[in-house]
Amino acid sequence: MKNAMTIDVEDYFQVSAFGHIIGKDEWDSYSPRVYENTSRMLDMFSEKGALATFFILGWVAQKYPELIQRIHNEGHEVASHGMLHQRASSQSKLAFKHDVGDAKMLLEDIIGSRVIGYRAPSFSFTRENEWVYDILAEEGYRYSSSVYPVVHDHYGIPDAPRARYSTPSGVDEIPLSTLSFKGRNFPVSGGGYFRLYPYLFTKWAISQFREESSPTYIFYLHPWEIDPTQPKMSDISLKTRFRHYVNLKRVERRLNALLDDFEWGAMAQIYGYDNSELG
């Protein structure tokens, strides 16, 4: 059984941690790097024979439709990350509906196939906004991967199931992977933890997860995480600086090792969802 490789396609200046210093109306004033970084990832996946699900920000799709088409043409799954990287926990129902609906329509217009997967920016599904699944169902999504069942200061539903589960709306939630130890879940799905943990620990954690919990492990990464020369933000806290920049120079080498050590596929492929061409 393959593991699921997932990429959250956004640029370095669009992360939630920088939201207090960079307004969305300022994004166009920054030099974008997402096209080149995502293209490098695609080259790596092609060389290693790996497929992935790309949760793509609508803003990126508007700027680079040819990049989205390349992702689709190379056999990867195109999925939605919303339009403007807004946390679902800070949106009204109407704003969320427009955000996920507009992003889905945009991506489908580019690739001509169904977009059925969604990931909320910053894993911002909570116990207080479970209405999001009803809206995802209304907009034609089949699954979400927006819950991290851990304790964290910015996200997490610690008591959520650790494997795929159905919601009353009919939309499935596929949570990020964790290891359970003494009644607590520990994050092992990539992102900042992939940079923080030694690679041998990540390799062990994936094998351990598959033995104990589920045959399918979920990994995620951002294109900016393979870019150690990205511009540095100045007006941020020491914690934010550490979380964003730690070990960036090691990620590309580690990702290559990960692609060699395990088999990788896309979410729709692994879980048996239909994302065929639109009629």
Image: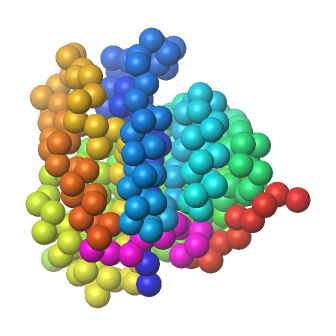
Hey, which residue is sitting farthest right in the picture?
Answer: 279
Residue 148 coordinates in the image, percent (x, y)? 37, 59
Q: Note whether 61 is above or below 163 in the view shown.
A: above
- Who's the residue at 66% across and 59% down the image? 116
**Foreground residue, 184 or 275?**
275
Q: Quadrant of residue 200?
A: bottom left
- Tell me what residue is drawn at x 40 percent, y 84 percent: 215
**Stretch of the chain drawn in magenta:** 261-270
The answer to whether residue 46 is above or below residue 63 is below
In this rendering, does residue 159 appear at all? no
Which residue occupies 55% across, 33% down? 60
Q: Nearer the viewer, residue 210 or 30?
A: 30
Quarter that holds the C terminus:
bottom right
Residue 2 within the magenta-colored segment of the rendering: no
Residue at the image position 51 percent from the left and 52 percent from the top? 54
Find out whether residue 266 is within the magenta segment.
yes
The colour scheme applied to this rendered structure is rainbow
